[in-house]
Amino acid sequence: MPPKVQQKSKEQKMAAAMAGGKGKKKKWSKGKARDKIDNKVLFGKEQWDRLYSEIPKMKLITVSTVVEKLKISGGLARRSLMLLAEEGHIKPVCVTRAQRIYTRNIADEGEEE
């Protein structure tokens, strides 16, 4: 059997417990701040041309993908997608209050060939 280890007295245990809790408190991090993106609120000539050339060729078209691609505001992207859908360039897949999903109009591409 190993030799017996001397037990600490109650006062020594109490002093050790009190000394252990005196460490520094953890500071909360400030969090990662995203840079403010300055998207356009009106179409320029370049964005208008890209809207009609690039967007109808995409397989998955949502408001956020249009915002990222053309660097326009969300409201402008929603209106432009509705306009493209009315003109028949894109086809709605799922249009709900929260999310609008469109796809390219395959019937258009078949007629052109």
Image (cartoon, grey):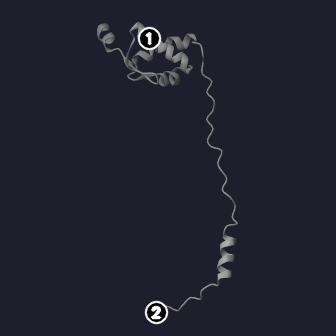
- Label tally: 2
Where residue 95 appears, as percent x and y from the top left, is 41, 20
Q: Which residue is drawn at 59% across and 13% down?
A: 42
Quarter occupied by residue 47:
top right
Q: Name the residue under label 1.
A: 84
Q: Where is residue 89 in the image (x, y as percent from the top left)?
A: 39, 11
Which amino acid, mark 1? Leu
Q: Is mark 2 on a helix, strand or loop?
A: loop
Tell me: 66 left or right of 15. Answer: left
| Residue topped by disc 2 | 1
Using a 10 Å C-alpha cutoff, classify the residue at mark 1 as few (fewer than 14 neighbours), some (14 to 19) or many (20 or more): some
The tag earlier along the polypeptide, 2 or 1, is: 2
Q: In which quarter of the image is the C terminus?
A: top left
Say above or below: 65 vs 13: above
- Secondary structure, mark 1, is helix
Tell me: 102 left or right of 36.
Answer: left
Q: Quadrant of residue 112?
A: top left
